[in-house]
Amino acid sequence: MSEYFKGISKIEYEGPNSDNPLAFKYYNPDEMVGNKTMREHLKFSVAYWHTFVAEGVDPFGSGTMIRPWNDIKDPMGKAKARMEAAFEFFQKLGVDYFCFHDRDIAPEGETLEETNKNLDEIAQFAKGFMKDTDIKLLWGTANMFNNPRFVHGAATSCNADVFAYAAAQVKKALEVTNDLGGSGYTFWGGREGYETLLNTDMKLELDNFARFLHMAVDYAKEIGFEGQFYIEPKPKEPTKHQYDFDAANVLAFLKTYDLDEHFKLNIETNHATLAGHTMEHELRYARINNMLGSVDANQGDLHLGWDTDQFPTDIYMTTLAMYEILKSGGFTTGGLNFDAKVRRPSFEPADLFYAHIAGMDAFAKGLKIAYNMIEDGKFDKFIEDRYGSYREGIGADIVSGKVGFKELEKYALNNNSITNTSGRQEVLEALLNQYIVK
Ligand code: XLS
Ligand code: NI
Ligand code: NI
């Protein structure tokens, strides 16, 4: 077996004063934060597509990435070399999970049958590595957006033959995910959306999408797949309007079609910002509705309007994201999947390590800061006090449902002195800074 990342050995924790770019500064896997280790809290996962498949193509130029495993011509040979490189990377980096699309790990054949055969063969190959290394599949998914057959979408295509093909593809992807012991299965919208309403039957497309998801739930039950299903919201790109717009929209869709008990959300930072939200907004919305499942950890560039999928290095974001994750009770089936890609000019294999280390350190630091914020309880206390009026008097009557408009009118008519207090935003922002920089 070839070694792809020569000269790089297992990445170790060296602490905040280290100037070794191939060492962790904050991520110390076995360090306890509360009653769990950092490793158990953070559950890092590598995204197969960005890290081992993508070649750095952009609309203005061809690939730049030096990826020796991708130079092999025979498609199955390439898939195997890629898998070897992937497991060498996972082990050296010290991550416990990975995620893939069916087409990331195995090439399409001439027919669906041949494609499925390829996938089976590579899945068995992966299984061997997984057994030897104890590295696990966080979630699997199906790529139903690359091939031109999905030009009008997959489950929301206007073409029933495409719906059928997509069903067959997800059926297979579920079997493979199940066989590899995956703890989840993700539906990201791919091309499920529209370009113009002038040619779109939105009602039929949404009904079909729900039918498709019900079929997936039924089939999972049939094969005994007990992993968690996720939907990953994204507002736009590749279609002008993606149906899984944001957390609130997805929850409404799931409830409308009686699917909410079978799904949780996989929240991605850059998708949140594309939807005009912060990451913490999306996580909070998912959390309070008991829908927070997993996270695609990346970040966008706020000056650009597309999904740049950069590695997450913004400590404010990782702190506030970890705050929501800890408040939700932490990950169960989910984890932090680096759905992130190195920039096109960062084309050397070593950049893959630097980038993941940067992301892991940023989340490790965010975890510790958020843990302290929660432990000290200052933010909780502020919020508790701010809403104190609902714990007594008329507020308590409102919350307990004792009063309606008539009683409230009577109260308001007799109450001529409404006093508000400051929201103290700047004080709280300064307090957050104290936690971050100390
Ligand atoms: C694309 C999505 C995609 C999903 C997996 O924007 O983030 O990478 O996570 O299909
Ligand atoms: Ni994603
Ligand atoms: Ni994305």
Image: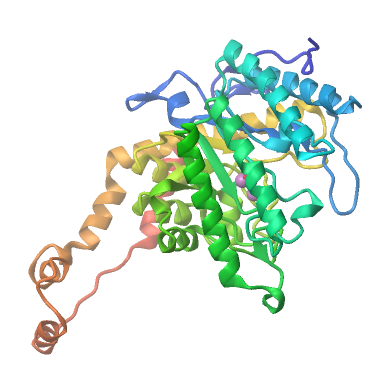
Between 366 and 252, the residue placed more toward the observer is 252
Q: Is residue 25 left or right of residue 238?
A: left
Q: Position of residue 428 (x, y in %)?
A: 37, 55
Report if residue 313 is visible in the image: yes
> Which residue corresponds to the image point at 14% horizontal and 87% vertical from the top-left?
409
Image quarter in which the N terminus is found: top right
Q: Position of residue 343 (x, y in %)?
A: 76, 42
Between 110 and 351, the residue placed more toward the observer is 110
Report if residue 140 is visible in the image: no
Q: Is residue 320 left or right of residue 76?
A: left
Between 179 and 132, the residue placed more toward the observer is 179
Q: Is residue 146 above or below residue 85?
A: below
Q: Position of residue 102 (x, y in %)?
A: 68, 36
> Which residue corresponds to the image point at 47% horizontal and 45% vertical from the top-left?
321
- The answer to which quarter of the image holds residue 233 is bottom right
Image quarter in which the C terminus is found: top left
Q: Is residue 233 above or below residue 85?
A: below
> Which residue corresponds to the image point at 47% horizontal and 44% vertical from the top-left?
218
